[in-house]
Amino acid sequence: MGDVWKHSQFYKDATTGELLPKYLLILAVRPDGDLVYRLLTSQAHQRPQAPACDKDGIHPGYFLGTPTPAGALCKPTWLDLREIEDFDARDFEALTKKNILTLIHSFPAEIMCPALECAAYAPDTTARQTKYIMAARATLRKRLPRAVLMPASNY
């Protein structure tokens, strides 16, 4: 959890038909190996930067800052909290072997814990996804230094 993957052929351009990339953030790994994830976006679409967690409106999101100022994620970036199917582990592995999916960044636990809590309780997150996301958050919280731990907020 916390890994950002570039999917180089995520969707087709409506005009040209060219395959275009998207960036995926892994939120949790289910017991069957499938991945709970959400897309990243640099399109604000009225998403605020503060508070970071915004679950209202048609474009709910979590503001992650500018993850890699000199890299692929060089713009202000949000975790898009809208619904998306979990990623099948076999498909993920096959796309990784073909270099269609490449790991480009990993967020530290300090950033992921509040992002996971926000994503877990977003309107489009299923009860099953919430369970896996919060389990992933609990695992990450164990890695945090005591000084960084804060009480869970009420999302």
Image: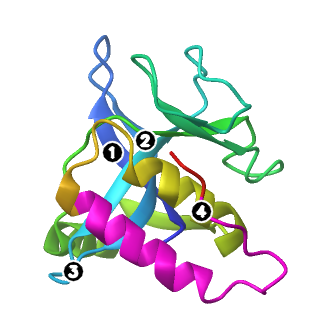
Separation of marks 2 and 1 at Cα, in angstroms: 5 Å
Name the residue beneath numbered marker 2.
21
Q: Quadrant of residue 9?
A: top left
Query: Which is more foreground, mark 3 or mark 2?
Result: 3
In the image, residue 150 lies at what x, y percent? 72, 68
Q: Quadrant of residue 143?
A: bottom right
Magenta stretch bounds: 129-152
Q: Measured along the vertical axis of the image, is residue 127 above or below residue 90? A: above
In the image, residue 87 lies at what x, y percent? 22, 60
Q: Are marks 3 and 2 in contact (CB under 8 Å)?
A: no
Separation of marks 3 and 4 at Cα, in angstroms: 27 Å
In the image, residue 54 lies at what x, y percent? 55, 31
* Label 4, residues with CA under 10 Å away: few <14, some 14-19, many ≥20: few
Query: Which is more foreground, mark 3 or mark 4?
Result: 4
Can see residue 86? no
Sequence-first tag of 4 and 1: 1
Q: Identify residue type, mark 2.
A: Pro
